[in-house]
Image (spheres, rainbow, N blue to C red):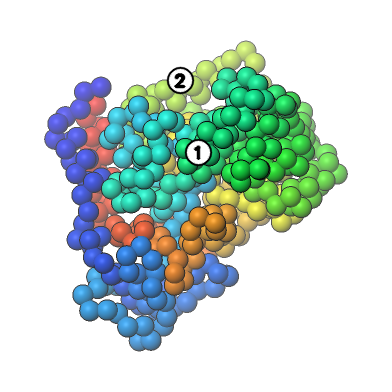
Amino acid sequence: MLRRLASLVLILAAVVAPTCAQDAAVVAFEGVTVVPMDRERTLPGHTVVVRGDRIEAVGPDGSVVVPDGATVIDGRGKWLAPGLAEMHGHVPPPSAPAELTEETLFLYLSQGITTVRGMLGAEGQLDLKRRANTGEVLSPTLYLAGPSFNGNSVSSPEQAEAMVRQQVADGWDLLKVHPGLTRAEYDAMAETANTLGIRFGGHVPAEVGLEHAIASGQETFDHVDGYAEALDASAGPVDPARLGDLVRQSRAAGVWIVPTMALWETIYGALPLDTLRAYPELAYLPPQQVEGWVGTVEQIRSGADYDAEAARRLIEGRDEILRALHAGGVRILMGTDAPQLFSVPGFSLHREFPRMAAAGMSPYEILHSGTALVGEYFADEDTFGVVAPGHRADLVLLDADPLAESANLAEIAGVMARGRWVDRADLDARLDALRSKYASN
């Protein structure tokens, strides 16, 4: 794919070069309404001081000393919330062009995402995590699953055990489960993971089944597909008694759900292809990637096995399952599976919010699922997810109240990742550069 040299230079410079505000050791937000996310409340007229990658002080204006030489950001008329998380995201493998990887990471950040749990690792990707988490690349903080456990990568229980041990030794943050494992292979993986203290999550292999996966200590269940399969949701209305039992098991086991509802609506045909193609955020991606998505959706929907009515029932069943999980107190984590079909990094999160609201989640509960609750999930790794002293300085400055409406999370005036501040003008310049780059191809 040919690219104009000027556009390439502009993008690389935009992704790598820090701004003056980011270079400052101390940043202070003054006169801002803090959305702390320790509980459902806002704190008007506050000052927040950040030193390095940590929040140093939070208090009413006049009660917090702003150090000399601090970069001061006027927060009057704005809201300061914790940065968001993409808890089922992907980043390109090391074999991908470096600029594509940097662009992907920036797209997450541009939409207020300051933490990404990458759910499909590739050999060599841990170096990207190091570079991202030390600020060499403008990026959210990364937590990465290793290469997946699936029917192609694992052929015996012994191999499953060895693979767990190797991924622990390599330093991956968690194990990713895909379909295809036999029950014996899954059990060997789970037992070894539990012994060595590494978490695992993702899909539910058909031979394993949801209840056995819950009992085995699988921590996250992504896409709700394991529940849909256990309840045979595509066949019609789910059995409420059976659903209630699964909800109770899930809550008792302390599992986490990463729904990715919008993606599955795309896969199963809830939106016309013309609507998907009109998403404005597609302008920030390589045209070949977008056309590849178009071809995939066309292939799915035109296949001999595609049943539009069964797809409609499945989507309705998934909605019912998520409503029941939320109502039953099972913890929901924000996530979209980006970048996948028409699920653009960062932007896809804002398309997920209406689905979460439809499941009965309030604006506070939606924001909680991507901030304080994520901090709880990663509590053994770091302290973040709340606007409070000692927390990692992951923040999003908003032009509207996110507790009034979740759509206001898109009204971004600036983003701070590990103390590095990127204002609206900088975000727009980088996005404009991406748009220009791909419009020229």
In-front residue for pair 294/389: 389
**Residue 375 on image: x %, y %:** 53, 58
Q: Which mark is residue 169?
A: 1
Q: Are marks 2 and 1 in contact (CB under 8 Å)?
A: no
Q: What's the residue at 51%, 44% (across, down)? A: 173
Label 2 element class: helix
Kindly identify the residue that appears in the image at 73 percent across and 40 percent down: 216
Please give the label number shown on residue 295: 2
Numbered circles on residues, count: 2
Residue at image coords 71%, 56%: 329
Q: Nearer the viewer, residue 223 or 193?
A: 193
**In this rendering, would 254 be left or right of 383?**
right
Q: Nearer the viewer, mark 2 or mark 1?
A: 1
Characterize the local packing of mark 2: few (<14), some (14-19) or many (20 or more) Cα atoms within 10 angstroms: few
Nearest the camera: 55 or 40? 55
Dot 2 or dot 1, earlier in sequence: 1
- Whole-angstrom CA distance, mark 2 to mark 1, is 40 Å
Give percent across and percent down for residue 230.
76, 34
**How far across and how far down the image is residue 1, in percent?**
25, 22
Q: Is residue 310 above or below residue 22?
A: above
- Give the amino acid type for the residue marked by disc 2 in the picture: Gly
Residue 225 appears in the rendering = no
Q: Secondary structure at mark 1?
A: helix
Q: Nearer the viewer, residue 333 or 123?
A: 123
